[in-house]
Amino acid sequence: APPDSPATLEPSSAMGVDDAEVGVITERAYARIGLFGNPSDGYFGRTISVSIQNFFSEVTLVPDQQCFSSRVSFEPGPYDWNAFDSLTALAEHTKAHGHYGGVRLLRALCVRFHAYCAERDIPLHAQGFTLKYRTDIPKRAGLSGSSSIIVAGLRCLMKHYDARVPLEDQPHLVLQCERDLGINAGLQDRVIQTYEGAVSMDFSDEKRLVETGAGRYERLPTSVFPELMLVWGDEGSDSGATHADVKRRWENGEPLVRETMGKLAAVAAKARETLLAVDSDEASRRSTLVALMNENFDLRHLMFGDEALGARNVDMVMTPRAFGAGAKFTGSGGAAVVMCPDGNDQWEKVKEACEAKGFKTARVVLNPAPCAA
């Protein structure tokens, strides 16, 4: 895709869907940026996230064309390779993309969707199907590629079975799929990918969260957000592994982790207040948002440490900051979101410096929430 344009994949026929096949369903789910407060969403905190059109995942459900067939199958996707040209090719592919692809996500979704419907006596017809996926979301870049595949798949299953999962239940259902696979995550990504647009999330009511699997969500107008730059590289991070040690320290009651998560939640609360103060001085407003963005990263850095974050990931954030911009990870590392409060000259300097170090850059294209939401 052009650097400043939304992602463009080929039409769905590129996935091998025959035009003669009846009832084919294709759904998308977009990448997201965690702007403020993350990773406190997994620790009864607060966050603000936006859905972006720069990248997305697409899942296609092809109903079984044989009468009375209830067969369910999955077509391997771009990261589900099981044959390689050599041992070296296998090692290099695994280093770049990890050990797992997207099929396991869709299988976990089908199991959880079946259980959800069974528990609520939602009838499901017997017609089988094949699920296939594709994605252009950079792998292990903290842009929620894994959950996007599940969200798109869930939308396909709801249409195929004409079975409605209420919007407020969808994030928890998606999160359960990932936890079944041992992925450490919070609700933030699943909320923004199901709700889309921009959402302020409050997970501080522990009793409500445990009982309902949901926090309190507030839609924010996308018009209140300044222009944002996305920066990403080739060295991604495994979000599950990155979070595992902090999760253990949280559960052990470590004061540093507990206190820092509280501070991250406060960053998100202050950012919400600042974003909505559209009648205030714009320069002051942007300055505050930049400071909060930088504070967010510094708190994460303090808690996780250099080794867990990785030197190149840290450099991805510190390079824009050297020019007075605000920068932080979009997720757990692999990509950063940048805010340039001083305008185009600053933007171009940041862009040039990042690209000189081998990072890719793009202007963020926000994805508005559906009108019916």
Image: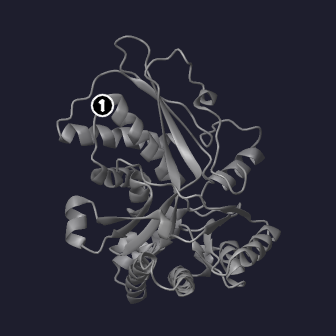
Left or right of 155 in this view: 207: left
Above or below, 130 against 151 in this view is above
Residue 92 position within the rendered picture, expressed as x and y whole percent measured from the top left? 73, 51
Above or below, 62 against 57 in this view is above
Left or right of 102 in this view: 191: left
Q: Is residue 100 visible?
A: no
Residue at 38% across, 23% down: 128
Q: Label 1 belongs to which residue? A: 162
Left or right of 126 in this view: 336: right
Residue 5 position within the rendered picture, expressed as x and y whole percent measured from the top left? 67, 53
Above or below, 74 against 176 in this view is above
Write down the quadrant of residue 308 in the picture: bottom right
Between 363 and 146, the one lying in front of the other is 363
Between 175 and 51, the one lying in front of the other is 51
Q: Residues within 10 Å of mark 1 (few under 14, many from 20)?
A: few
Q: Is residue 157 visible?
A: yes
Residue at 46% across, 66% down: 49
Between 73 and 25, the one lying in front of the other is 25
